[in-house]
Image (spheres, coloured by chain):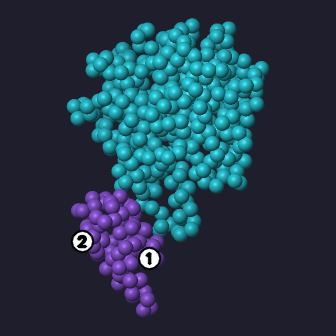
Chain colours: A cyan, B purple
Amino acid sequence: MTCKRRVAITGLGAITSLGSEVEDIWKNLLTKKSGISPITKFDASAYSTQIAGEIKNFDPSCFISKKDLYRLDIFSQYALFAAEKAIQDTQFSLDKEDLTKFGVILGSGMGGINEIESQADVMKEKGPRRVSAFSVPRLMINAIAAEISIKYGFLGPNFITASACSSSAHAIGQALRAIQYNEADVVITGGSEAVITPLSIAGFCSARALSQRNHDPEKASRPFDKNRDGFVMGEGSAILVLEEMERAKARGAKIYAEIKGFGTTADAYHITQPSPEGEGAKRVIEIALKDAQICKEDVHYINAHGTSTQQNDKIETLAIKKVFQERAYHIPISSTKSMLGHLLGAAGAVEAMVTAMSILKQQIHPTANYETPDPECDLDYVPETAREIRLGCAISNSFGFGGHNVCLVFCDPKKQ
Amino acid sequence: MERKEIEEKLYDIVSEIVGAPKDELKLETTFVNDLSADSLTIVDIMTRCEDVFQITISDEEAENMKSIGDAVKYIHTRLEKDKKK
């Protein structure tokens, strides 16, 4: 058996409701700034939920030509924007690289839902002949991986993972494997999502998944708090560049963190509910730690899935307790969704980015809006302020509708 | 519809779809050679013309329109014919 190669994170890029620079997003998270506000993308007055983490004033024209903008759904525009930032961050000289060893593996939950909705309207109003020739290439979920490979000439592994809210965590896991087992030296990974649309918000409202705290948007996403009433939709993209460790070191690259382990399981229980005993979540953390060859005692931080739904936060807490036992009470846990909302298929990528930043900075962001303790959520959710901690190893959890579970393990390469 | 009006509308459509500034477009501008339009782009321009001018353009007719001027001429003749009906 060949030995697994080590993998470094050497580039980050993102676009979210809290900014379009990774450093800005990070600072906003440390200071508990909220990206949640009333929906402006469409008239939401008839909706039970009227708030979301919208990206305002997005201007991709510096990176994407007008011609390309016309033929790209907004979820692809977000991905191309974040990818350009992440690739710039690596300081690669792409003209000197062997691009057959560069892959693109991304995740999205719903792909080009904006395009699906608008072309469905065109068809209903004007008939099938008026549907745009670009509708299919705009809406297909794999557009983001394809567009990035075409733009930069990346010739290696290229595909999409779709597992709802764990999509981009799966993508990062597959990117890790592609480098570990020598299918690629560099993989552009992460995810993108743009689902603040009339139809998808209506669907999530009908499923009773969203918070209805319309009068107080910034307090609506309150993971692990007793008075949580559902998640808040977010949108955006986060892209991570994974690179084979020795190569990254040899070129003197900035290394944010090492990505060391990946686990993936299914609940095999219900299409939206997590299994009540948290077994799928428990197993996935254990599998990921074993994959990383990390002892439970060495985990210093958990970036939770923490959606602010009754079920998720309770079951995730239970799973963490089952894995870490008494130590669970001493591991700080935070939820990025408390400020950005839930980016669905891009959530795992944003949270992987945040976990990598936590390792680089040896600092963790708080969970916003944790005010009233819930007896079933009684761990340390970092409710007050950001903390400086000794952070050798961290995990990030992602759980998707359908019962998909992913856990990723990140380490400080200097402490390995 | 006046020929000049058709021309203006064509510039709007083409400018939006290929992302070229309107003032760079002329009647002689060709879709493939000057604007590097691929087959999807040309189909999309024709679909938009069908919508804006309320006509039907067959694939064969579209095939013969190499420039913006060709399209203006075709649409103008077509609208004149429809008027006489």
**Callout 2 crowding tier (Cα within 10 Å): few <14, some 14–19, many ≥20:** few
Above or below, comparing residue A389 to residue A227 in the picture: above
Judging by the rendered image, the residue that carries numbered circle 1 is B53
Q: Which residue is mark 2?
A: B28
Q: Amino acid at mark 2?
A: Glu
Place of residue A178 in the rendered image (x, y in percent of width and height, measured from the top left)? 38, 27
- As rendered, which of A315 and A201 lies closer to the eye? A201
Residue B25 at least partly seen: yes
Q: Which numbered dot is residue A72?
A: none
**Label 1, label 2: how many angstroms apart (C-alpha)?**
21 Å
Q: Are marks 1 and 2 in contact (CB under 8 Å)?
A: no
Around disc 1, counting alpha carbons within 10 Å, would you say few (fewer than 14), some (14 to 19), or many (20 or more)?
A: some
Assign the C terminus of chain A to one quadrant of the image: top left
Which structural element holds mark 1? helix
With respect to residue A209, does A322 lie above or below? above
Q: Chain of mark 2?
A: B
Return the disc, 1 or 2, that comes first in the chain's sequence: 2
Q: Is residue A355 left or right of residue A99?
A: right
Q: Quadrant of residue A136?
A: bottom left
Which kind of residue does numbered mark 1 sit on? Phe
To which chain does the residue with label 1 belong? B
Identify the residue shown where x is 27% and y is 70%.
Answer: B26
Q: Is residue B41 left or right of residue A331?
A: left
Seen from the viewer's position, the closer of residues A301 and A29 is: A29
In the image, residue A340 lies at what x, y percent?
A: 58, 34
Which residue is at the front of the view, A366 or B70?
A366
Q: Quadrant of the N terminus of chain A?
A: top left
| Residue A3 image position (x, y, % from top left) | 36, 14
Q: Residue furthest bottom?
A: B84
